[in-house]
Image: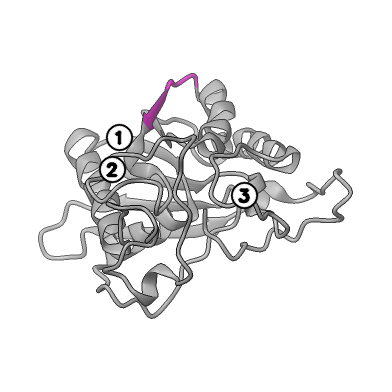
Amino acid sequence: MHLYLIRHGESFVNLKDWNKGNLDEGLTPLGRRQAEALAAWLPQEVPHIDVLYASTMRRALETAAPLAQTYHKPIIADDRLREVGNNRLDHTPWPSDDLPNYGPFWGSERPFEAITPERESGESLMHFRVRVGQFIENLIEKHRDEVIIAVCHGGVIELAFDHMFNIGPFRRCEVWSKNTGVAYFEYVEHPLREAWRLHFHGRVEHLQGIDRTDGRGPDTYDARKTKS
């Protein structure tokens, strides 16, 4: 199985001056250009895919839309690909118009505590890791010999690394993904070797030459404080 994990394009919630809390916002104008550039570039690297998954959050679905047109594949929306904190501890999603706000601490600081402490039944980092891991293991069962794209969030990609590398709950290294950055994992069927092979992470050459036109100045594509 060949799995391409892609972070969504820039969303309004990623902007440095965003102060409206955790909302299910779509892409900024720059984010839409990033998504279009991704869809124009990726088929040169990945000419064929079998399945296109996306998080059910707006910023991921809007990023996946140009890919769906390019590859002529329907988007399979999956709640397990939502960003950390946007699902309950039983993995069901919070309503998109009533998302909980994050607590004052980073998830890896208290991996067993709800990261949305003001909302009962909020998920912890470990609950989040379980749902990401369940998604990945389900892919192996359903798409063992296929090419998969999953458009998701920075936190999902980070916890996919934890799952595949078998990292414990107290993390020592962050995995940062830029907007529309691409990571490529291959599931390797070999009884005496590692199950996963990481080919690359964070490819964004499709963003060369894309600048802001909204008055905020050139974009550096640096990851924001939030991975969402």
Measured as percent of width and height from the top left, residue 110 is found at 33, 74
Quadrant of the drawing holding the N terminus? top left
Measured as percent of width and height from the top left, residue 80 is found at 32, 42
Residue at image mark 1:
146
Against 17, residue 72 (above or below) is above
- The residue under the point 32% across, 51% down is 186
Cα–Cα gap, marks 2 and 3 = 33 Å
Residue type marked 3 = Val
Quadrant housing residue 144: top left
- Which one is in front in this view, the residue at disc 2 or the one at disc 3? 3
- The residue under the point 48% across, 54% down is 101
Q: Is residue 76 magenta?
A: yes
Residue at image mark 2:
1
> Who comes first in sequence, dot 2 or dot 3?
2
Secondary element at image label 1: loop
Task: Name the foreground residue: 43 vs 96.
Answer: 96
Measured as percent of width and height from the top left, residue 49 is found at 41, 31
Residue type marked 1 = Glu
Left-right relation of 106 to 121: right
Secondary element at image label 2: loop
